[in-house]
Image: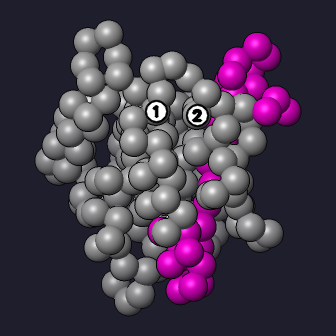
Amino acid sequence: MSRALVVIDVQQGMFTLQPPLYRDGEVVERIAGLLRRARAAATPIFHVQHDGGPGDLLAKGTPGWAHHPAVAPQPGEPVVEKQHSSAFHGTDFHAQLQSRGIDHLIVAGLQTEMCIDSACRHAVALGYRVTLVADGHSTYDSRVLAAQSIIDHHNHTLGSGFVVLSPAADVSFGQR
């Protein structure tokens, strides 16, 4: 069995909202670094792309639908298109991972309390080992909480038995 890097919803539309995405440049650079290292190690990479439907900021075919250019898929890297919060719900993502013998997912991307949380929990429920890149996901300030508090809360909650947390600098794509 092997591991794969999963980059979730790092799409152009996510960078146009107000308030802005928390530490957007830092997070994109960390994910770009993970992609470079995963590619160098020939680690499988999956990109997840959200389609919010007609009229949505992330509607398929709109400028917001496109991947952020710093972390865009390269030829041969699968893209899983989804319409729900979890990358597994209503997609063939699980089947793609199983057909490649992947049992460990390294997860980074957007949005912490939505698609990152859902993907991590769904993956664990399906029996995958999950490493969440603790400094490789982000969100926006809400009316109730600052983005950093949302990120800290999810790292704490998910890291309390669901996933292994790792800073991007410590993620290894070599031998397990």
Q: Residue at x 79, y 33 (%)?
A: 63
Q: Residue at x 69, y 47 (%)?
A: 67
Horizontal side of 39 relative to 76 (left or right) equals left
- What's the magenta region? 34-63
**Percent x, y of residue 35:** 55, 69
Q: Is residue 21 above or below residue 141?
A: below
Q: Is residue 171 above or below residue 116?
A: below
Q: Which mark is residue 21?
A: 1
Q: Is residue 91 visible?
A: no
Is residue 37 covered in magenta? yes
User: Residue 27 versus residue 98: which sits nearer the camera?
Assistant: 27
The numbered mark, 1 or 2, whose residue comes first in the sequence reads 2
**Percent x, y of residue 146:** 27, 24
Answer few, some or many: residues within 10 Å of disc 1's Cα (few below 14, many 20 plus, some between 14 and 19): some
**Percent x, y of residue 161:** 17, 50
Q: Is residue 25 visible?
A: yes
Query: Residue tagged by mark 2?
Result: 15
Q: Is residue 94 above or below residue 173?
A: above
Answer few, some or many: residues within 10 Å of disc 2's Cα (few below 14, many 20 plus, some between 14 and 19): some
Q: Secondary structure beneath disc 2?
A: helix
- The CA distance from mark 1 to mark 2 is 6 Å
User: Residue 150 versus residue 97: which sits nearer the camera?
Assistant: 150
Q: Amino acid at mark 2?
A: Phe
Q: Secondary structure beneath disc 1?
A: loop
